Image (tube, rainbow, N blue to C red):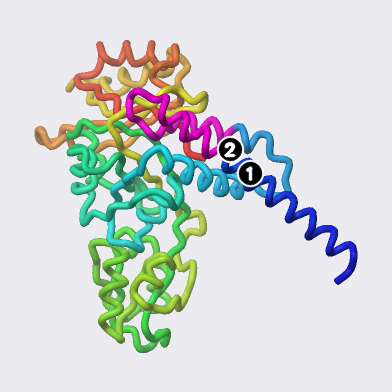
Amino acid sequence: MSEKLKQCRDQIDHIDNRMLQLLNQRAALAQQIGHLKDNGVVLRPEREAQVLQRLQANNPGPLSDDAIVALFTEVMSQCRALEAPLTVAYLGPAGTFSELATLTRFGSAVQGQPCATIDEVFRSVETGSVHYGMVPVENSTEGAIGRTLDLLLQGSLQVCGEMMLPIHQCLLAQNCELGAVKTVYSHPQSLGQCQGWLNVHLPHAVRVPASSNAEAARLAAENPHSAAIAGRQAAAHFGLTVCVENIEDLAQNTTRFLVLGKQQVSPSGKDKTSLVLSAPNRPGAVHELLAPLARHGVSMTKLESRPARSGLWEYVFYVDIDGHQADEKVASALAELRHIAAFLKVLGSYPVAN
C-alpha cells in the first residue's frame, strides 16, 4: 500500500469518527426537542423542507443535491424515530411504488402500513391508527387518480406534503423468454404507461389489470407463463427476475404522491396550496373563479375538473396555486374566492416537493 493511499484512508477514518460524533450530537438534540414539544406532533414538514433547502443551497459538491437530500432524509428519519415511532399508511402490498414513495420521503425508520385500497389509507389516517398516509394523486403519463381526488373532497384530512417519484417500470417474470409470456399483469395505470413497449415486444400477450403492481408480481410468481409490470423492488419480494428495465413509454414518467394528515402545516418559504371549488351555474362563472388569483398575482400550477357526483353535468375543480394560505397575496385571493365560489375547500398548504 502506498503512503499516499494510507494517508487518504487515515483521513477518511478520522472524518468518519467525527461524523459519528456529530450525528449522535444531532440525535441527542432531536430527543431534547421531542421532550420540549407540547403538542405531540413528531413531523414538521415545513422544518424538514427548510433544512433540505438550506443544505442544497450550501452544497459545494462533489455530491449531487439529490444525494444530499437522500442522505439527510435518512438522518432526519433516524433522529425523528428517537422522538417517537412514525407510522405511515400506503397503498400496498409491500413492493409497490407507494411503498417506495413512503421510504423515499420518510426514510427507513418509518413504520409503513400497507393497505389494500386508497380508501383504506384515508380511513387509517382518519381513525388515528396511523400518523400519515401516502397516496398517488396523478401521473405525468396517465393523468389524475380519480379515487384520490374524490376522497380529498369528501374527507377531512389535510394535505401535509407532496412527493414526486420517477417511475421506472420493469418486466418481471420467472422465465425471461418473451416468447413464453402469455399473460401480463399490472395496475391499469402501469399498463397504460407501457402500452407502446407491450405493442412491440408482447403484442399477443393478454393484459390483465391487477389491484397493484405488487399484486401483479404475486400473480406472475404463481404462473410460469406470465409476467408482471412493476418496479424492480417488487422482484425481490416475490422471487422474480428483472427481465427488462425501463419499459415505460416516456423516460420522464413521474407519479405525484400526497402526504395526508390532520395537522396544518406552517409556511416553509417555498409552498403550494391545494383547493377544490365549484362555480355557480351561470355563464362566465369559471372565468370569475380564476380572476381573484390573477388580481392578487397568485400563480396557478394545476386545474383539474372532476364530476361533482351531486347532479348531472356538475363539476368541481381541483386547483394548485403557488404560496401558502397564510401568505398575504394567497389569503386575499382566497377571501375573494369564498364570496364568488359556490363551494370552496382548502385541502392544505405544504412545502413544494424537492
Residue lying farthest left? 311
- Mark 2, Cα crowd under 10 Å, few <14 / some 14-19 / many 20+, is few
- The reply to whether the C-beta atoms of the residues labelled 1 and 2 are less than 8 Å apart is yes
* Residue 213 picture quarter: bottom left
Horizontally, is 186 left or right of 201 in the view?
Answer: left
Residue at x 32%, y 58% (from the top left corner): 189
Residue at x 24%, y 66% (from the top left corner): 210
**Tag 2 residue:** 25
- Mark 1, Cα crowd under 10 Å, few <14 / some 14-19 / many 20+, is few
Amino acid at pointer 2? Gln
> Quick check: is 102 in the magenta stretch?
no
Residue 21: give its label: 1
Of 253 and 35, which appears nearest the observer? 35
**What span is in magenta?**
26-53
* Disc 1 element: helix
Residue at x 31%, y 66% (from the top left corner): 214
Task: Give the image location of residue 232, x and y in percent.
Answer: 44, 68
Task: Give the image location of residue 257, x and y in percent.
Answer: 37, 45
Residue 138: give its label: none
* Disc 2 element: helix
Of 292 and 188, which appears nearest the observer? 188
Q: CA distance from mark 1 to mark 2?
A: 6 Å
* Residue 220 picture quarter: bottom left
Residue lying farthest right? 3
Q: Is residue 140 visible?
A: no
Q: Is residue 351 visible?
A: yes
Q: Note whether 148 is above or below 231 in the view shown.
A: above
Q: Note whether 212 is above or below 178 in the view shown.
A: above
Of 70 and 97, which appears nearest the observer? 70
* Residue 329 picture quarter: top left
Task: Give the image location of residue 260, x and y in percent.
Answer: 31, 38
